[in-house]
Amino acid sequence: MKRIDEPRLESDLAYRFSYLCEFMEFSADDVEAIHAAAPAIAPLVPALVDAVYDKLRTYDATWRHFVPRQFGYEGELPEGLESLGQDHAMIQYRKQHLARYLAALVTRPYDGKMVEYLDMVGKMHTPQAGSAEIDVPLVQMNALLGFVSDALVATILGLGLERENEVATLKAFGKLLWLQNDLINRHYASGRRHSTGERRVSRTQRETAAAE
């Protein structure tokens, strides 16, 4: 039985990612399948991005997070939720970020820098990084990743790949998105641990004060 340093999983990103890859059996063959799909997926990225933003605009619970100034955006801000359309400069800015993210998934090597990038994707949607005004609830992040996963599956199934390659590509992207899911969720879990710690300290202080 292999021993896992569980506390290190929470403090060492590379160790965590390595463990997840080993457990899920995300291998060089999976990375090869993902990279091999790049020429076919790349021309479809704009349509994927549009589909994602059409879905995000369907709900106030997701669209409201695009009203505050986005990190790195220096242009004009929208007047409010209802007036924020797909053609607004800030939405176009965010669409460019999503397009680059999708391109990175199918082109970049899965080295330490890529792991840090995937981790930052999760962190950027919390006040821990980027804009302090952006705090997307975990339920919305899970909903978004589920939609993206389904859209990617539909895209891959529409590529007309030979069955063996199609299965390998679907499996590879499935593992990759679960890896991304963990690197999103961990930033919310760390926030809960911090809050729990604060509550414990506060409770201890109250009990001490009561005893005095």
Image (cartoon, grey):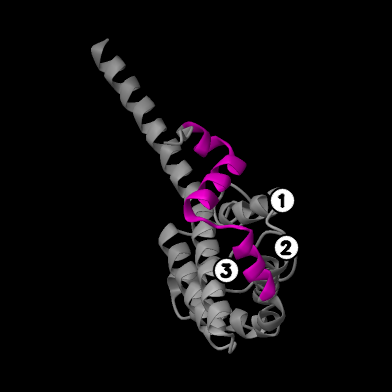
Gap between marks 3 and 2 measured at Cα = 31 Å
Magenta span contains residue 17: yes
Say few, some or many: other residues with alpha carbon within 10 Å of mark 3 (under 14 / 14 to 19 / 20 or more).
Answer: some
- Frontmost of labels 3 and 1 is 1
User: Looking at the picture, does residue 117 appear above or below residue 90?
Assistant: above
Residue at the image position 57 percent from the left and 68 percent from the top:
67
- Residue 133 can be seen, yes or no: yes
Tell me whether circle 2 and circle 1 mark residues in contact (CB < 8 Å).
yes
Residue at the image position 70 percent from the left and 85 percent from the top:
43
User: Looking at the picture, does residue 55 appear above or below residue 19?
Assistant: below
Of the residues shown, which amino acid type is indicated by label 3? Val
Q: Quadrant of the C terminus?
A: top left
Q: Which of 55/9 is in front?
A: 9
Tell me the tag on residue 108. Answer: 2
Q: Which residues are magenta?
A: 7-36
Of the residues shown, which amino acid type is indicated by label 2? Arg
Of the residues shown, which amino acid type is indicated by label 1? Lys
Residue at the image position 72 percent from the left and 59 percent from the top:
109
Left or right: 58 as drawn, with respect to 207: right
| Residue at the disc numbered 3 | 67
Say few, some or many: other residues with alpha carbon within 10 Å of mark 1 (under 14 / 14 to 19 / 20 or more).
Answer: few
**First in sequence: mark 3 vs mark 2:** 3
Tell me whether circle 3 and circle 2 mark residues in contact (CB < 8 Å).
no
Residue at the image position 55 percent from the left and 69 percent from the top:
173
Residue 92 occupies quadrant: bottom right
- Frontmost of labels 3 and 2 is 2
Q: Which of 169/75 is in front?
A: 169
| Residue at the disc numbered 1 | 113
Q: Which of 149/164 is in front?
A: 164
Picture coordinates of residue 14, whole percent (x, y): 61, 43
**SS at circle 3:** loop
Gap between marks 2 and 1 measured at Cα = 9 Å
